[in-house]
Amino acid sequence: MMVTELEKLEEITFHEDDNSELPPSDIVAYNELRSCADLFRMYNQGILIIQPEFQREIVWKAPAQTRFIDSLIKQLPIPSMCFSLDYKTQRWQVIDGLQRMASIVRFLSGESWTLSKLEDIDPRISGQPTSKFVDWNSELHQFYTRVENLTLPITVLRCDYSKKSHTNYLFTIFHRLNAGGMRLNNQEIRNCIYSGPFNDLLNNLNENSTWMRLNRMTKTMGYRFTKQELILRFFAFHDRYQKYNGRLAKFLNEYMAENMYPDDEFIDEKRALFERTIDIVFLKIFGGRTPPKISTTVFEAVLVGVSFNLAYLEAQPDARVRTFFERLLEQEEFSEQRLSEGLAGKPRVIERMSIAKTIFSGR
């Protein structure tokens, strides 16, 4: 399928870090050594967070995990991992080294996992189930003990997650440290940094069947959190599009930071807003059918425009609501050329949201 220039530009917005600020002077970085057993203990006690939702989206295949365990057993040099430490909550977060930590946890937990049969690893461990390594009476237990006792280099960033400047800096660190072959996009990073009830809500709403049909999704996985970012954009633009500053990543980061631990009333309000909005879009604009492919930028404007006029639109005939959508598409601001000229620029975004809000009001 041919990818348009607009689609390429829209894809960039899911990856771009627009934070250009200097590192906060009160973040302290230091190096330390920790044994694999200690890291495993921290994980089991809930002190070290490695985001299971994130792991399901990007994860090493079994051969890569097996080779890493083989490297630990052979005590080969392992690159330093990077963790953040929120000194107020004593919460540790993996910034760089997620797959290494996941492999350590998987091996030491003795879960149902059989190491891959590979020619370039120690033949004694090739194809062996991890349950044998955990067994004290097994000859393989020596390798389990060796991994437990092995110390790994850790770079620790001591910070305060309640400070926007700190979480913005961590966001940039995630970008810089994960710029290799498995580069993280913005929402994957937010899923780590801003984990909490609001992030859980985004992940939960992404499983809504109407939302999935609107996005032509057959399953929730495989989109690398880009659909959760669309939901985040919807909430952020609905609440404060007029305060948008032209820096999309930072705008969304700050919205998540401010709403990381909301009360139940906030969660219920956002859920209701989202569900009423997508019901109108799905049923009244697209007639309860999977919609044709439309640009992300147009889609988010439609969602925001509809959300400001829920009661009015719910009372309108489907055909009338559909004409509002058609009017929106006819606007110069929503032409592909116009969108390509300034996708995330401040005046363009504010103008698009204002137009959508007005059109769906029936005026």
Image: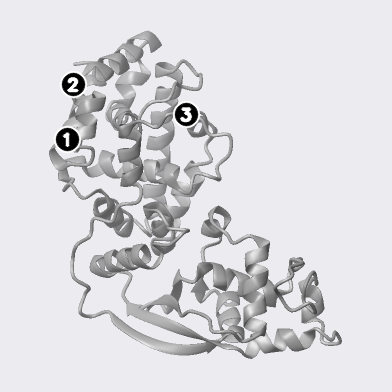
In the image, residue 122 sits, relative to residue 59, either above or below, namely: below
27 or 266: which is nearer to us? 27
Image position, residue 347 (x, y; %): 13, 38
Tell me the distance, in whole angstroms, between the alpha carbons under discs 1 and 3.
28 Å
Type of residue at label 1?
Arg
Secondary structure of the residue carrying numbered label 2:
helix
For marks 2 and 3, give the CA distance: 26 Å
Q: Which residue is depicted at the point 23% across and 55% down?
A: 18
Task: Left or right? Give the position of 120 relative to 292.
Answer: right
Point out the tag, 1 or 3, that comes first from the N-terminus: 3
Location of mark 1 (residue): 348
Mark 1 or 3, closer to the camera: 3
- Sequence order check, earlier mark of 2 and 3: 3
Q: Amino acid at mark 2?
A: Glu
- Badge 3 marks a residue whose secondary structure is loop
To which residue does mark 2 refer?
332
Which amino acid type corresponds to the residue marked 3 in the rendered image? Met
Q: CA distance from mark 1 to mark 2?
A: 11 Å
Q: Is residue 269 visible?
A: no
Residue visible at 28% across and 68% down in the picture: 169
Residue 307 visible in the displayed image: yes
Compared to 185, does 294 lie above or below? above
Q: How many marks?
A: 3
User: Is residue 131 depicted above or below 36 in this figure?
Assistant: above
- Mark 3, residue position: 1
